Image (cartoon, coloured by chain):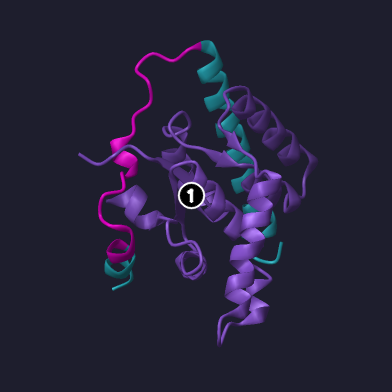
């Protein structure tokens, strides 16, 4: 029997698997980073309002994970380790901050990241060895 | 190939979506959250249909 650790979704999986995520609302965690990415890329005011309502209700149920000062610090050190690795692509590291924070929140909350962006999270795994990840396809379709 | 690689790294022990279930009886608060999530996802999909797929990688 697999241990029930908690799935944590990367932003990219939401539009593709919204229906399935609906039945996982009470058994998953949602990160404030995902809300940041959804809100920052929203265009219409009505969309922003819908996100806000969803976020408020999730917060009320304590399902939203927020990075603390310590999480920022440890994530920075992890990304630094990548930066210092021989042959690291510095341009790519600039885009990893949010994913690295999601990874950190998964590690300290006994969770695993469900994502389409396996390559980025595998890179983060090099400096966060206890990070667990799963492809969205494996998680939702197998 | 990718699946095998990821499973090798993470073990094959992580639960899948099918391993989690909604509670059989939902409270008013729970129903409210589900409805808010539905509305948010509907809005996201409509916006993507209108303006194109979102790219979160540059944030």
Q: Is residue B27 above or below residue B14?
A: above
Q: Secondary structure at mark 1?
A: helix
Q: Colour of chain B?
A: cyan
Which chain identifier belongs to the purple chain?
Answer: A
Q: Is residue A68 above or below residue A27?
A: below
Q: Is residue A110 above or below residue B12?
A: above
Of the 4 image quadrants, the one containing the N terminus of chain A is top left
Q: Residue at x 51, y 19 (%)?
A: B30
Q: Is residue B19 left or right of residue A52?
A: left
Residue B9 magenta-highlighted: yes
Q: Is residue A16 above or below residue A51?
A: below
- Residue A6, picture quadrant: top left
Q: Which stretch is magenta?
A: B7-27
Give the camera-side residue of B35 and A69: A69
Q: Residue at x 34, y 42 (%)?
A: B17
Q: Residue at x 68, y 37 (%)?
A: A51
Q: Position of residue A49 (x, y in %)?
A: 74, 34
Q: Which residue is mark 1?
A: A107
Number of marks:
1
Q: Position of residue A54 (x, y in %)?
A: 63, 31
Q: Position of residue A86 (x, y in %)?
A: 55, 86
Q: Position of residue A82 (x, y in %)?
A: 58, 74
**What crowding class fits label 1: few (fewer than 14 Cα within 10 Å), some (14-19), or many (20 or more)?**
some
Q: Main secondary structure of the magenta part?
A: loop
- Residue A24, picture quadrant: top left
The answer to whether one can see residue B19 in this image is yes
Residue extending furthest left? Answer: A1
Residue extending furthest bottom? Answer: A87
The answer to whether one can see residue B55 in this image is no
| Chain at numbered mark 1 | A
């Amino acid at each position: 029997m697999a241990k029930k650790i908690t799935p944590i979704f990367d932003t990219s999986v939401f539009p593709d698997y919204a229906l399935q995520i609906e039945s996982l609302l009470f058994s998953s965690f949602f990160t404030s980073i995902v809300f940041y990415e959804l809100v920052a890329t929203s265009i219409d005011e009505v969309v922003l309002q819908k996100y806000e309502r969803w976020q408020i209700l999730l917060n009320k149920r304590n399902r939203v994970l927020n990075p603390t000062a310590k999480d920022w610090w440890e994530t920075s050190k992890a990304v630094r380790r990548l930066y210092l690795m021989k042959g690291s692509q510095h341009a790519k590291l600039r885009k990893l901050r949010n994913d690295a924070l999601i990874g950190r929140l998964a590690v300290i909350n006994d969770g695993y990241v469900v994502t389409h962006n396996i390559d980025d999270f595998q890179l983060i795994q090099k400096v966060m060895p206890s990070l667990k990840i799963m492809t969205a396809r494996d998680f939702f379709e197998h | 190939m990718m699946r095998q690689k990821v499973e090798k790294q993470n073990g094959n022990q992580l639960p899948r979506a099918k391993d989690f279930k909604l509670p059989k009886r939902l409270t008013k608060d729970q129903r409210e959250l589900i409805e808010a999530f539905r509305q948010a996802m509907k809005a996201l999909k409509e916006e993507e249909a209108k303006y194109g797929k979102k790219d979160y990688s540059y944030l």
